[in-house]
Image (tube, rainbow, N blue to C red):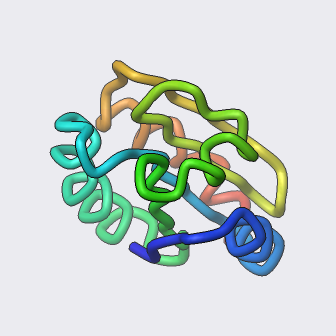
Amino acid sequence: MINLTTHQELIDQIQLNQAVLVLFGGINCGICQAIKPQLEKLIEQNYPEMKTLYADCQTYPELGAQASVFSLPVVRVYFEGQLFLEEVKAFSLGKLVADLERPYALMLE
């Protein structure tokens, strides 16, 4: 998972890669820290072509503010530069992985 420090890095990664998952979290967010390694592993196993990014909104608050993230954790998935899916606060990692199956397969065609 690539750690972001600026909003421009986020924009660049979304534009450069066909599939991008961004986890907006915080160093003091227990849920964020718990799901980060699980999410990274699930994406690596199921969607190896998807770029994974991490934005620490507590260390770099401008990242969250410029992305309009006001609560943590938030997961956003982009396909070909467009926001496809957003999950906020309480969500199932299994459902998230399942929801990405079809668009990911279409992207690879």
Residue 31 visible somewhere in the drawing = yes
Which image quadrant: the N terminus?
A: bottom left
Task: Look at the picture and state if 28 lies above or below 43.
Answer: above
Residue closest to the far top = 90
From the viewer's side, name the closer residue of 58 and 13. Answer: 58
Which picture quadrant has residue 96? top left
At x 61%, y 57%, the residue is 104
Residue 63 lies, in percent from the top left, at: 63, 53
Residue 58 appears left or right of 106? left
At x 17%, y 37%, the residue is 30
Which image quadrant: the C terminus?
A: bottom right
Residue 39 appears left or right of 14? left
Residue 109 visible somewhere in the drawing = no
At x 22%, y 35%, the residue is 31
From the viewer's side, name the closer residue of 79 and 25. Answer: 25
Which picture quadrant has residue 84? top right
Task: Give the number of marks.
Answer: 0
Residue 95 appears left or right of 55? left
Residue 22 appears left or right of 6? left
Residue 37 lies, in percent from the top left, at: 21, 59
Residue 88 lies, in percent from the top left, at: 49, 25
Task: Look at the picture and state if 34 lies above or below 88.
Answer: below
Residue 87 lies, in percent from the top left, at: 51, 29
At x 55%, y 57%, the residue is 21
